[in-house]
Amino acid sequence: MSRLFACLPATPTVSSISLKEWRLTGIQVLLLALSLQTTVCMAAETDFMPAFQAAKSRDLAGLDYYSGLMQGNLLGMYPEYWKLNIDLATQSPDAIESFAKRYLQSAIAEKLVADYIEAKAAIGEYDTVRRLAPYVSNPDYDENCAIVQGQAAGGDVLALSALRDDVWLKTSKISDLCSKVADQLL
């Protein structure tokens, strides 16, 4: 039932007219809710493409506008995601963690955190990597290398051995993040 109302605002407003005064039956209430859901979802979809265009043009004010407009609906996380993703490495860990907590276990939150972890590992900010690594449940190859570098920098050098077979003595080209792990195994 919760997916049925996924596009409704998280905190709906209550009218001063009660359902009893309206004398609505259960079916009428359901039909009313479905029509509200359709209206809210259509509004979210209508705002999504202009928000996407604002992200493509790096229009931070536009993203703020659409973030407020779309807040509380199914697509409402995207303007904020796009805004944080602009100059990702310069964002604060608090902003990234806040997003991850609000949209816990969503693919978009995990992607933002994983990309952020890679960016921070590339510049050697391993404390941040360790802090945010728990928000990445399904790391890809490079993300795994970034997480392992963070663990090793925090004193867990055995973490490096977990990637030994993936990075050690490879003839194929490996990424810079994973190359650092291979160098640390020397």
Image (cartoon, rainbow, N blue to C red):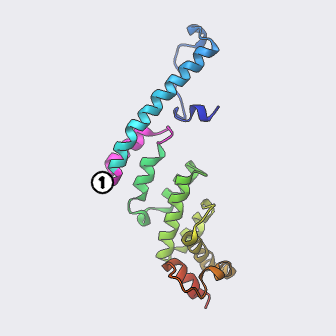
Residue occupying the point 51% across, 33% down: 9
- Kindly indicate the quadrant of the structure image that contains residue 171: bottom right
Quarter placement of the N terminus: top right
Q: Main secondary structure of the magenta part?
A: helix
Residue 104 is left or right of residue 53, and the answer is right
Q: Nearer the viewer, residue 90 or 39?
A: 39
Residue 47 is left or right of residue 170, and the answer is left
Residue occupying the point 57% across, 71% down: 141
In the rendered image, residue 160, in percent from the top left (x then y), is placed at: 64, 80
Q: Nearer the viewer, residue 32 or 153?
A: 32
Q: Secondary structure at mark 1?
A: loop
Which residue is outermost to the front? 171
Q: Is residue 62 magenta?
A: yes
Residue occupying the point 33% across, 52% down: 60
Residue 96 is left or right of residue 155, and the answer is left
In the rendered image, residue 68, in percent from the top left (x then y), is placed at: 41, 40
Residue occupying the point 59% across, 20% down: 30
As displayed, is residue 178 above or below residue 186?
A: above
Q: Which residue is mark 1?
A: 57
How many labels, in total?
A: 1
As displayed, is residue 84 above or below residue 121?
A: above
Residue 66 is left or right of residue 38, and the answer is left
Magenta range is: 55-75
As displayed, is residue 122 above or below residue 131?
A: below
Q: Is residue 42 magenta?
A: no
Classify mark 1: residues with Cα within 10 Å, few (<14), some (14-19) or many (20+). few
- Kindly indicate the quadrant of the structure image that contains residue 88: bottom left
In the rendered image, residue 119, in percent from the top left (x then y), is placed at: 47, 70
Three-letter amino acid code at disc 1? Ser
- Kindly indicate the quadrant of the structure image that contains residue 158: bottom right
